[in-house]
Image: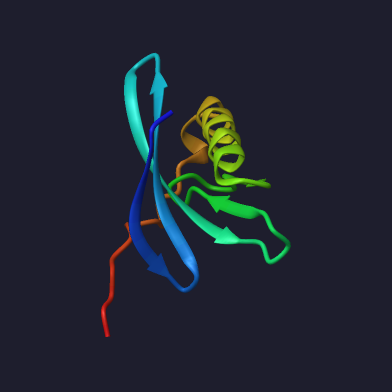
């Protein structure tokens, strides 16, 4: 797992990047990370339907996200989210 802080904030979410090695090679996914308000973190991989997790620390969250991304990929193409187009940064 590779975690890079991109320093991008969108509506209280922070964007991190996770690289997952698969039999077909490496794939990269963005993870939106939000403080859960109770000392932990919630992560969402918007490129995969229903792919989210929780962790008490960022390291725990990213480990959990690596696992849940792998599980979503095992489910096959139906896990892909065709409605997700990407993340853009808006500066006002």
Give the left or right position of residue 66, taking residue 36 as reference: left
Which of 58 and 44 lies nearest the eye of the viewer? 58
Give percent across and percent down for residue 16. 41, 49
**Residue ID at (51%, 55%):** 33
Give percent across and percent down for residue 59. 55, 39
Which of 49 and 38 lies nearest the eye of the viewer? 38
**Residue ID at (49%, 48%):** 45
**Residue ID at (61%, 38%):** 60
Give the left or right position of residue 43, taking residue 85 as reference: right
> From the viewer's perspective, is residue 77 above or below residue 56?
above
Q: Quadrant of residue 23?
A: top left
User: How many marks do you count on the picture?
Assistant: 0
- Quadrant where the N terminus sits is top left
Residue at the farthest bottom position:
92
**Residue ID at (40%, 67%):** 9
Give the left or right position of residue 69, taking residue 55 as reference: left
Q: How is the image coloured?
A: rainbow
> From the viewer's perspective, is residue 14 above or below residue 43?
below
Give percent across and percent down for residue 66. 52, 32
Give percent across and percent down for residue 76. 50, 29
- Quadrant where the C terminus sits is bottom left
> From the viewer's perspective, is residue 58 above or below residue 2?
below
Residue at the farthest right position:
38
Give the left or right position of residue 40, taking residue 80 as reference: right
């Amino acid at each position: 797992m590779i975690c890079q802080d991109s320093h991008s904030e969108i509506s209280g979410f922070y964007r991190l990047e996770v690289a997952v090695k698969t039999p077909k090679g490496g794939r990269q996914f963005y993870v939106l990370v939000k403080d859960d308000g109770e000392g932990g973190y919630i992560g969402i991989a918007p490129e995969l339907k229903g792919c989210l997790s929780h962790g008490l620390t960022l390291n725990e969250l990213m480990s959990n996200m690596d696992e849940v991304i792998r599980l979503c990929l095992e489910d096959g193409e139906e896990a892909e989210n065709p409605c997700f187009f990407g993340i853009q940064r808006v500066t006002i």
